[in-house]
């Protein structure tokens, strides 16, 4: 029986995994500079967390979650996104009571959604995201936007567009909600089945429908920007002023909404404008939320965050032809000839690794020529040749593969010698 990976999942093999590791290191370092600390949450949570936190009216909850009963009869769900889990942890561990606020987290890990697999969109995907909890200062909105855009720019991407909108506060949203219902209700029967439900549950999400995007009523739908009260309008203006101060370009899109129910005020997406990237241009998105912390049992707390797919980030790098600076070669390869030399090579390989040097050797009993070919194939910088004769003379032959130069080094000095060659050791 042939066993393949489940549909919508993938193996990330050596040669590709190094790209993932590089990207993850760069993102973690960027977060360090912004003073965001890593949080790691469980891969599965109680289903109610996502029903309450993400929203019953969302496609994620209604159609895409991997939900099952555990052996105790409890309903659990593989996490489809990161924010709800981060907020749950924030509440459960009473982080809101700590003196240093706001709390600034970043996370990175697999998420799961049951949807039709396509390029850059898998059923298991890796998401990087940040959350800033405990501040309703527009300046932190601008900080999150800067970090989000910087996540791509740090890796060399240039064909980017930041799209911005305000969803307003509760009062503004309710006024806009009523206007949307009045606008779309005469066309209810012309809308898809999902939008007919959304019109009652969360009419803002009708604007985000992929099926009805060409319906004439979409282009004439009332804009949230026309229903912002003074507070919401002032808040949005402050966010834009901070972006202007940092020299960050953006576009306003009054029809931009987010697919999760907990957003208000600032909402944004970052898109790729690279030629050949694909029909779905969104790289990441996020926004501000109020009420989510209360929804999972905590005090009234506002927050803002964003999330990105690592898969789509790598697609964008490929579309712009950006090669990541990854060294896939090997520092040192040990070639051993003879029974005693083989024993000494095992000891030497261990000593070199203990000294922080990347090293490998032959484990297939190959002859010397084949071992040199293996060292060349894996890009070894140096080959250390040890035979019984060298062992008797207490020396080892060091070959620099780039130049072909060779020299003998005392066997008891080889570790320090290689440290100096490779990592500047004394």
Image (cartoon, rainbow, N blue to C red):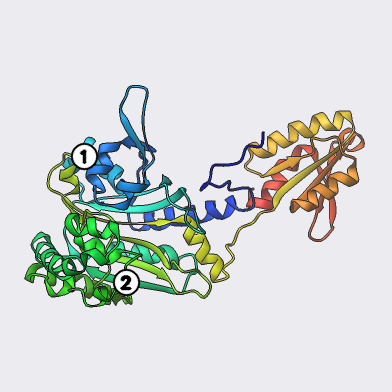
Residue 331 % position (x, y): 70, 49
The percent coordinates of residue 203 (x first, y second) are: 20, 61
Q: Nearer the viewer, mark 1 or mark 2?
A: 2
Q: In this figure, which residue is indicated by the disc labeled 1?
A: 91
Can residue 99 be seen by looking at this rendering? Answer: no
- As drawn, which residue projects farthest toward the right? 389
Q: Earlier in the sequence, mark 1 or mark 2?
A: 1
Cα distance in 3D space between marks 1 and 2:
31 Å
Image height check: is 147 above or below 38?
A: below
Residue closest to the eye, 25 or 218: 218
Please identify the quarter of the rendering in which residue 345 is found.
top right
- Residue extending farthest to the front is 189
- State left or right for residue 189 relative to residue 351: left
Q: Residue at x 61, y 41 (%)?
A: 4
Which quadrant, please, contains the N terminus? Answer: top right
Where disc 1 sits, the SS reads helix
Q: Mark 1: few, some, or many residues within 10 Å (few <14, many ≥20)?
A: some
Whether residue 240 is visible here, answered yes or no, is: yes
Q: Is residue 414 above or below residue 312?
A: above
Describe residue 238's horizontal placement relative to residue 414 as left or right: left
Near-viewer residue (362 or 183) = 183
Residue denoted by label 2: 163
Q: Residue at x 68, y 50 (%)?
A: 420
Q: Is residue 7 left or right of residue 86?
A: right
Q: How many marks?
A: 2
Query: Where, by quadrant of the figure, is residue 256 drawn?
Result: bottom left
How many C-alpha atoms fall within 10 Å of the one at disc 2: few (<14), some, or many (≥20)? some
Between 421 and 403, the one lying in front of the other is 403
Picture quadrant of residue 184: bottom left
Is 417 displayed left or right of 169 in the figure?
Answer: right
Q: Which sits in the foreground, 26 or 127?
A: 127
Q: Residue at x 49, y 53 (%)?
A: 117
């Amino acid at each position: 029986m042939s066993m393949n990976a489940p549909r919508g999942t993938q193996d990330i093999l050596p040669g590709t995994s190094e790209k993932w590791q590089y990207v993850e290191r760069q993102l973690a370092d960027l977060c360090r500079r912004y003073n965001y600390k890593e949080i790691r949450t469980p891969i599965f949570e109680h289903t109610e967390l996502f029903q309450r936190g993400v929203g019953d009216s969302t496609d994620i909850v209604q159609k895409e979650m991997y939900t099952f009963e555990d052996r105790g009869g409890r309903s659990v769900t593989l996490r489809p996104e990161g924010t709800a889990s981060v907020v749950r942890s924030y509440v459960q561990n009473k982080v809101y009571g700590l003196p240093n606020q706001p709390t600034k987290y970043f996370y990175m890990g697999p998420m799961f959604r049951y949807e039709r697999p396509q390029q850059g969109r898998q059923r298991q995907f890796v998401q990087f995201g940040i959350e800033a909890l405990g501040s309703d200062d527009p300046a932190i909105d601008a900080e999150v936007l800067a970090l989000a855009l910087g996540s791509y720019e740090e890796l060399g991407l240039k064909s980017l567009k930041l799209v911005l909108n305000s969803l307003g506060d509760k009062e503004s949203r309710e006024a806009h909600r009523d206007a949307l219902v009045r606008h779309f209700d005469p066309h209810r029967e012309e809308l898809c089945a999902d939008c007919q439900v959304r019109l009652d549950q969360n009419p803002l999400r009708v604007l985000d429908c992929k099926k009805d995007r060409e319906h004439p009523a979409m282009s004439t739908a009332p804009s949230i920007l026309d229903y912002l009260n003074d507070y919401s309008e002032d808040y949005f203006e402050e966010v834009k002023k901070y972006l202007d101060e940092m020299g960050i370009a953006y576009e306003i899109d009054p029809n931009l909404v987010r697919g999760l129910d907990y957003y208000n005020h600032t909402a944004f997406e970052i898109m790729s404008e690279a030629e050949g990237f694909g029909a779905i241009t969104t790289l990441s998105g996020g926004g501000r939320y109020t009420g989510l912390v209360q929804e999972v049992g905590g005090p009234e707390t506002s927050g803002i965050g964003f999330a990105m797919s690592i898969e789509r980030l790598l697609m964008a790098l490929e579309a712009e032809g950006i090669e990541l600076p990854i060294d896939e070669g090997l520092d040192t390869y040990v070639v051993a000839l003879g029974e005693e030399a083989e024993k000494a090579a095992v000891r030497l390989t261990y000593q070199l690794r203990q000294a922080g040097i990347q090293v490998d050797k032959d484990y297939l009993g190959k002859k010397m020529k084949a071992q040199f070919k293996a060292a060349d194939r894996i890009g070894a910088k140096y080959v250390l040749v040890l035979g019984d004769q060298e062992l008797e003379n207490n020396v080892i032959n060091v070959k620099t593969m780039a130049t072909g130069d060779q020299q003998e080094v005392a066997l008891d000095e080889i570790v320090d010698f290689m440290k100096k060659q490779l990592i500047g050791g004394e």
